[in-house]
Image (cartoon, helix red, strand yellow):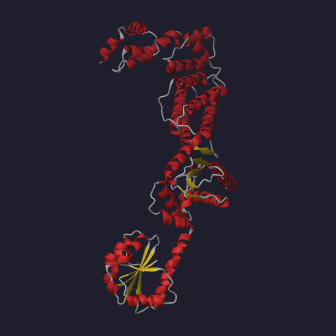
Amino acid sequence: MIVFVNTSITTINLIKKNPHFDFEYLFFNKKNRNIIFETNQNLVVIFEEKYLKINNLLNLKKSKKQIYFIGIFEKENADLIKKLVNLELLNYIFNFSKNSLSSLINKIKFKNNNRNNLFNNPIYKSMFTSFYIFDLIYGDLTKLNALNEITGFKMDDLPNSVITLMIDDFWEICRTMDNRDRYSLKMEYSNLVKNAINCYQIKALSCSLVGTDKIIILVKSPYNFSLNDIALKIKNYINKNSKYTVTLGLSNSYDDFKNIWKAYEESFQALNYSFFVGKNEIIEYKNIKNLSSKTNLNHDYVQLKYYFFKNLILGNKIEIQECFMSILNFCINEFLDKETIKFLITNFIFEIVDYTNKLKLKIKKEDVYTKAINVNSKILRAYSIASIKDISYEFLINLLKDIEKYKKDNDFILDNSINFLEKYYYKDLSLTEVANVCNMSDSYFSRKFKEKFNINFSTYLLNIRLEKAKELLKEKNLNIENISEMVGFKDSSYFSKSFKQKYGMAPHYYRDNFK
């Protein structure tokens, strides 16, 4: 729309008489002021230097529309021009004394055509679509009508559900790419989504979520088929036309587009569940479970780790893999979130390394820790439980190969029994149970243990428990009964008696003397 501001009737009539002038126009006056401010159209503002009131231009600029200012000057006025340019109130100067009237009309036409070309340009259209999507999600409806016109979405077509699409293993794929290649890959998939929408005539808009591996799709889900059907069409189209797979998270569908913010959150929560179901899947919010971030786990988790270490040295590969998988399954069944699972598994990997490094393996400890660090780095980047399982299995198999050659060495096996006692002294360990860890009979284990360490099994275990108790007695907030239980004594009076026999004083006197 053309707006004449502080322009003489003579000049306006000269412009209007030109046969090429076919634009909608208004005069900036009290009568038209509100119409101009309320219109959704962008403006070309024409003003005349001779009658100019800068405040009128400033008021138009405050309307936050796209405005192109054309000034008509009869003489050069450098100071005024500089001032207008600094205030961003002058885009083009027209001099009546040097230019024909038709050149001004052509300039207006050129600007109007540029506006149309701007909206048809895929880059700008994509940008406007992005604005539209996030204005909807975050409830800013002030520009809705204007953006509807640009995007081609009518008010009746406003979306009622959200699909969030993730390029599987995107960050792993992009590890060796520079920013330009990474951007190109993301744009390739963004265009594939748009092509799928056009191919199947889906009422939807999409945009890339900057700095992520995700693309947002706002959908007007029809009643004759489900959002899952739409997602399947998009997924199959992408799989057919691209190298990498995608996973899609689906929200619930709502009657009112004002709930689109909720749908947006739901689609993200659904997509987070891909960690458990794997890649190239469609995950509906209504089917997922609430995940937890707790790390203070119950007795079952501790017991599963106990069985793992019990089998680590002499168990076969399948048994050890099953023990490890039971720990992963426990994490899943407890509905732990992916970051908590990664935290627990990476800590467990280091726990395994600490345990095996205490054995007399002819392997450099530094090499084992380096391997563990590399494995944990991969686990932290893993996109699914299946990936964590594969990464962990590879680590375990390599470790078991190093252990395999020592399985028939009695000294090594007995060293492992000490290692096991040091780790699980607090449990109700019997000679039979530890003998089983060494794959020996009770009598054979008992005899070999005493031959190697010059002490019988029960005394060795008792000494470990009492040494651990000494350390705990330094903690003022723990009472004697608690300490007794923590180090594996069932009876606190027996603990006190044993402690006094070994150290010559009762536990509470030891604590007092330590102070």
Q: Nearer the viewer, residue 485 or 223?
A: 223
Instruction: Report the residue at 39% width, 86% height from top.
Output: 72
**Numbered-mark total:** 0
Q: Quadrant of residue 208?
A: bottom right
Q: Residue furthest right?
A: 240
User: In the drawing, does residue 348 fall left or right of residue 237?
Assistant: left
Could you say where residue 129 lies in the image, as x and y percent from the top left?
A: 53, 62
Is any atom of residue 383 visible in this view?
Answer: no
Q: Quadrant of residue 389?
A: top right
Q: Nearer the viewer, residue 302 or 403?
A: 302
Q: Is residue 293 above or below residue 498?
A: below
Q: Residue furthest front?
A: 31
User: In the drawing, does residue 339 fall left or right of residue 12?
Assistant: right
Quadrant (top left/top right/bottom left/bottom right) for the C terminus: top left
Could you say where residue 173 lies in the image, as x and y percent from the top left?
A: 60, 51
Instruction: Report the residue at 48% width, 83% height from top.
Output: 107
Q: Nearer the viewer, residue 407 or 205?
A: 205
Instruction: Report the residue at 70% width, 54% height from top.
Output: 240
Q: Is residue 252 above or below residue 119?
A: above
Q: Nearer the viewer, residue 213 or 378?
A: 213
Q: Is residue 39 above or below residue 286?
A: below
Could you say where residue 11 lies in the image, as x and y percent from the top left?
A: 40, 89
User: In the drawing, does residue 123 fall left or right of residue 8?
Assistant: right
Could you say where residue 326 lies in the image, as x and y percent from the top left?
A: 60, 28
Q: Quadrant of residue 189?
A: bottom right
Instruction: Report the residue at 35% width, 20% height from top.
Output: 474
User: In the drawing, does residue 3 fall left or right of residue 415?
Assistant: left
